[in-house]
Amino acid sequence: MQIGIVGLPNSTKTTIFNALTHSQEITAVTSSGKIEVHTAIVDVPDIRVDELSKLFKPEKTTYARVQYNDVAGLKIGSGRDGSLSGELLNIISQSDALLHVVRAFEDDRIPHPEGNVDAVRDLSALDFEFLISDLQIVERRLDRLTHDLDRKGTYPERSVDQAEHDVLIKIKEGLEEETPIRRLEFSPAEEKITRGFQFLTAKPALVALNVGDEGSDNPADFPIDQGRSDVVCLHGALEMEIAQLDKDDAELFMAEYGITEPGLNRMIRLNYELLGLQSFFTVGEDEVRAWTIPQGATAVEAAGAIHSDLARGFIRAEVVSYQDLIDAGSLGEVKKLGKTRLEGKDYIVQDGDILNIRFNI
Ligand SMILES: Nc1nc2c(ncn2[C@@H]2O[C@H](COP(=O)(O)OP(=O)(O)O)[C@@H](O)[C@H]2O)c(=O)[nH]1
Ligand SMILES: [Mg+2]
C-alpha cells in the first residue's frame, strides 16, 4: 500500500517525509524542479503492539507498514489551469492514497510560490488540478464511447460500453460541480468500472496542515471543508527534529514542548485507516507482530496474509480480543476465563483481534 505525498513547492513535503522516515533528504528553499520520487517504508505506530511486546517480551516485534512516496517537482501555482505534467500525474496515480501537505505557517525566509501563505487556497488549488486531470480522462473516454455507441449499432460489448458510459456521465457531472469522485456514491458494479481508471480524486486523501512551531493543533481552526477532506495538524520542523533524536532525547524534547504523542503518529494511523486497512496480531515468545488486512476481511483471508498454506489448510482460528488479553495478563488466564473463541473461515476479523490459526496441510 502506497501513499503519495503531494503539495505545492515549499509546502514542506520533504520535511514531513523526513519526519516520517527518520531520514534526511534535502529540504530546500528552492527545489530543483526535477521530478523525483523518494520512497520509504514506515512502521505504523500502534500502542497495542507496544503493550503486547511488553507482555510477551518476544525476540522480535514487528509493526504494520505502509509506504510513503515523496513526489518532488510539482510545478504548479494556483492558476487553475490543468498544468500538471503527465509524468507526474502518472506517478501520483499509482498511489493508493494521497497525503496532501499544505503550508499553514508564516516564515519570511521561505518563499511561497503564490507570494503569500493561504492554506485554504493552496489546498483547493491542488484539489482542482486533480479534478481537471480526472475530468480530462473522463471526457476523452466518453468521446470514444459515445462514438462507438452512436455508430456501431448492435455489437457484442454494447451493454458493457453503455454501463461504462453511464458511470462516466455521473462522474463528469460530479466533477463539473467540483465534487471529488471519492464523495460520489457508486453501486458495486459502478465501483468496479471506475477502479481501472486510477482517478486522482477517487483516492482517499488526508490533508496534513503544517502549522509551524506555534500554530494550532485543531483542524477546526482552519476554514477547510471537513466533509471533503480529513485533516491533521502537524508541527513540521519540530516533528522532523523529534524523529532525528534517539528515543530518550525525543521524550525529553516532547516533554519540553508539552507534546504527548507526535502528531505524525496520529497521521500515519489515520492514513492506514483511510486506506481501509486494519491490523490483527499474532503473539508469542519469538515474535509479536501486526498483520495488515482490509477492514471486513475474514479469518481465512487473515490466515492467507500470514502464509498461503495457512489459508489452504485452515481449520479454525483461535481468537482473543486485545483488551481481554491485556486485562487477563496472559493467554493461559484469558483461556481460563473462557474468553478464547474458536471461529470458522467466514468470521469477520475485528481490528485488534489476536489470532492463532489452526491448520493442517
Ligand atoms: N519555520 C518553519 N519552517 C519549516 C517547517 N517545516 C519545514 N520548514 C521549511 O520549509 C522549507 C521547505 O520545506 P521542504 O520540505 O523542502 O518543502 P517541499 O518543497 O514541499 O519538499 C524548508 O526550508 C524547511 O526547512 C516548520 O514547521 N516551520
Ligand atoms: Mg521536497
Image (cartoon, rainbow, N blue to C red):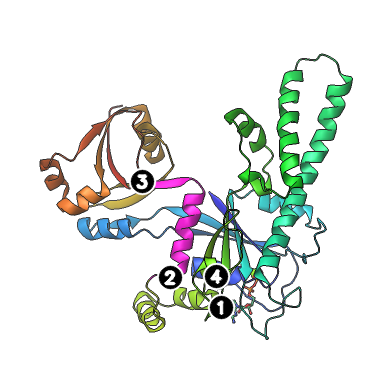
Q: Name the residue under label 3.
A: 351
* First to last magenta residue range: 261-280
> In terms of secondary structure, where does tag 4 sit?
helix
Q: Residues within 10 Å of mark 3 (few under 14, many from 20)?
A: some
**Where's residue 231, x and y in %?**
54, 61
Question: Mark 4 or 1, which is nearer the eye?
Answer: 4
Identify the residue under disc 4: 221
Label 1 neighbour load within 10 Å: few <14, some 14-19, many 20+: some
What is the distance, in whole Å, between disc 1 and disc 3 at their CAs?
33 Å
Residue 226 vs residue 196: left or right?
left
Work out whether mark 2 precedes mark 3 in sequence or the reverse, and give the earlier one. 2
Marks 3, 4: nearer the viewer = 4
Residue 88 location, x and y as percent? 73, 56
Q: Distance between the residues labelled 3 and 4?
A: 31 Å
Decide: marks 3, 4 in contact (CB < 8 A)?
Answer: no
The residue indicated by pointer 2 is 262
Q: What whole-number distance in Å separates the C-alpha atoms at marks 2 and 3? A: 23 Å
Dot 2 amino acid type = Pro
Q: Residue type at mark 3?
A: Asp
Ranked by sequence position, the earlier of labels 2 and 1 is 1
CA separation in Å, label 4 and label 1: 14 Å
Q: Which amino acid does label 4 sit on?
A: Asp
Residues under numbered marks 1 and 3 in contact, where contact means CB atoms less than 8 Å apart? no
- Three-letter code, disc 1: Gly
- Magenta stretch contains residue 127: no
Question: Vertical placement of 63 versus 298: above or below?
Answer: below
Q: Which of marks 4 and 2 is in front?
A: 4
Which residue is at the front of the view, 99 or 165?
165
Residue that appears at 44% across and 62% down:
266
